[in-house]
Image (cartoon, rainbow, N blue to C red):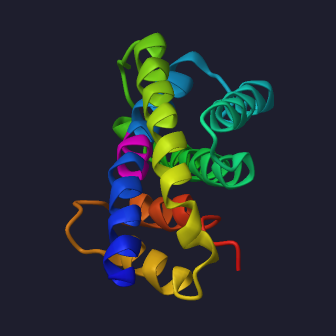
Amino acid sequence: MHDRIVADGLAAVRPLVLARLRLAGRIAEHKWLLGLPISDPERERAVLDRAEAAASCRGHDPAIVARVVGSQIDASKFVQRALFTRWTDDPWTAPTVAADIRSLRRQVTAIDDALVDAVGAAAAIADDPGCAARVRDEQERPDDALDAVHRTGLRLAWAAFCRR
């Protein structure tokens, strides 16, 4: 029974992690075309503050929510840096059009809002002695069509879930 609860809790987080990670490339395209930096500490802080505030309002542990959302930001920046490197090395692969950043940010915000509840509901798993093994299983599940860059990003996205 305990194993099923653990698996179910992580299963609710996984699609959100993947959805956010998949937006990283589209965000990178926008930044590339406008010559914007990958890191935006002010925006990143605002995203973390919003997630922590939402967690507190909804009765979830803001510390784990902030850790997990922070890992999502780190994973996204990793993917964006890798794409920038690819486009610098092979300019003919660089994007020529990009999605509207406002639309992308709305999608990221919706994912982060859902992550607050999913992570909040799964927070007990973070203290479970088997957390690291469970997270590793989620990181290594073969059912996602992820390239090597996104696979590494996925590992980063889960990096801070466990407290131990």
- Where is residue 131 shown, x and y percent of the image? 54, 80
Q: Is residue 17 visible?
A: yes
| Percent x, y of residue 30 | 48, 22
Q: Quadrant of the C terminus?
A: bottom right
Residue 19 in the image: above or below residue 75: above
Residue 21: in magenta span:
yes
Residue at 32% across, 51% down: 15
Q: Is residue 92 magenta?
A: no
Query: How far across and down, in percent of the image, does residue 54 sit?
Result: 63, 31
Q: Which residues are magenta?
A: 17-22
Q: Which residue is drawn at the image coordinates 61% and 53% (left, top)?
A: 68
Question: Which residue: 49% across, 53% down?
Answer: 121
Classify 100 as above or below 13.
above
Count of marks overlaid on the render: 0
Residue 91 seen from this side: no
Q: In front here: 150 or 124? A: 124
